[in-house]
Image (cartoon, grey):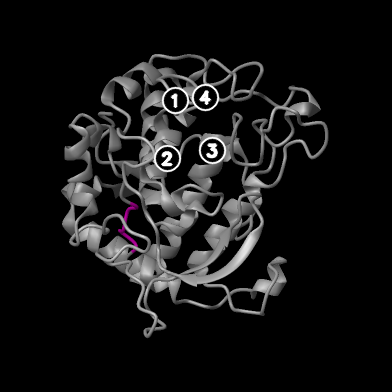
Amino acid sequence: MSVTRPNILKDSTTLKKYCDGVNRLKNEFTGPATQDLGIDGPAQPVSTYDLFVVWHVNAMMTPTPAHGNPEGRNAAHRGPVFAPWHRFMLRQLELNLQRVLGDQNFGLPYWDWAADGEGSPQDQLNSPLWTPDGIGGSGAPITTGPFVFDPGDDASFRVRIDTDSNGNFEQVNRGLERTLGQDIDTLPRKADTATALQLTPYDGPPWTVSSSGFRNQLEGWTGSDGPGMHNRVHVWIGGDMGPASSPNDPVFFLNHCNVDRIWEAWMQQNGRTYVPDQNAPASLQGHRIDDQLYSLISPPVTPADVLDVTAQYVYDSLNV
């Protein structure tokens, strides 16, 4: 059954369900403990939601290939696998949210950050997304919205695992942090997405942050001054969206759902194509079309497996 993924700012019911589902996953402890995942410190159970944090960190810290990788590609970023790996991760979160919500029709919402980016810097900060009725605003920790930390309430939203500046795991017990608009003052604009949609092929040599295809523009290593598109959103939000443990902030998935929507729009225009193919050299291992995507909580999947997901979900609009 195919579900529809809506714009979170146009669907208050889905917004509330998303926040409820995230908090449920944050308080579901059916998986491994920290010592099972190689995280130093006292042994603690790891929630289902926090497994997504660990998964993302491990992918970022896994060079591809494992040896001789001067370009900095990893199992989820800085190369062709960026879009399919995150699509894979989003779908696993969506399935878990459907499960804990008891709603098989739930579609993971996206945040159309380019629409917000059309406003002034102050308008961007005043988006309904950052209100108490949205997902809360700035702060260290944030003090509004559904993800506020209460030291006296074990069920409140808390950051338990993050990473230091070197990408190493740390065990913490604190609230979620954001610094909206402080490190860079504007979000991407619709002109950025329009430019990206005109770029072909999907990716190309040198298959890195220096590539000239669609993927690199979408990821944000090329394009506007400073970080662009996906990268720019991470920097604009700041706080917990900065380090490798960025899925600690639930806005991570709203950002990447929009990234996935833009990729889907590109494929609608240019075909469900992906490069490199399996004949590419071993130096691109982990990024070729039939290479296994790095996984922590699901069966093996390849980029080829996620090129057409219309039987699983569609977007309410591909007008990006």
- Label 3: how many Cα within 10 Å (few below 14, some 14–19, many 20+): many
Determine whether label 2 and label 4 are within 8 Å by CB. no
Segment tinted magenta in the rendering: 104-108
Judging from the image, what secondary structure is the residue with disc 3 in? helix
Q: Nearer the viewer, residue 248 or 167?
A: 167
Label 3 amino acid? Answer: Pro
Q: Nearer the viewer, residue 25 or 235?
A: 235
Where residue 7 sits: x, y (%)? 24, 45
Where residue 184 sits: x, y (%)? 36, 35
Q: Nearer the viewer, mark 2 or mark 4?
A: 2
- Sequence-first tag of 2 and 4: 4
Q: CA distance from mark 4 to mark 3?
A: 13 Å
Residue 106 among those drawn in magenta: yes
Determine whether label 2 and label 1 are within 8 Å by CB. yes
Q: CA distance from mark 1 to mark 4?
A: 14 Å
Which residue matches tag 2?
A: 235
Where residue 180 sits: x, y (%)? 32, 46
Label 1 amino acid? Answer: Gly
The count of marks equals 4
Which residue matches tag 1?
A: 226
- Label 4: how many Cα within 10 Å (few below 14, some 14–19, many 20+): many
Q: CA distance from mark 1 to mark 3?
A: 24 Å
Which residue matches tag 4?
A: 216
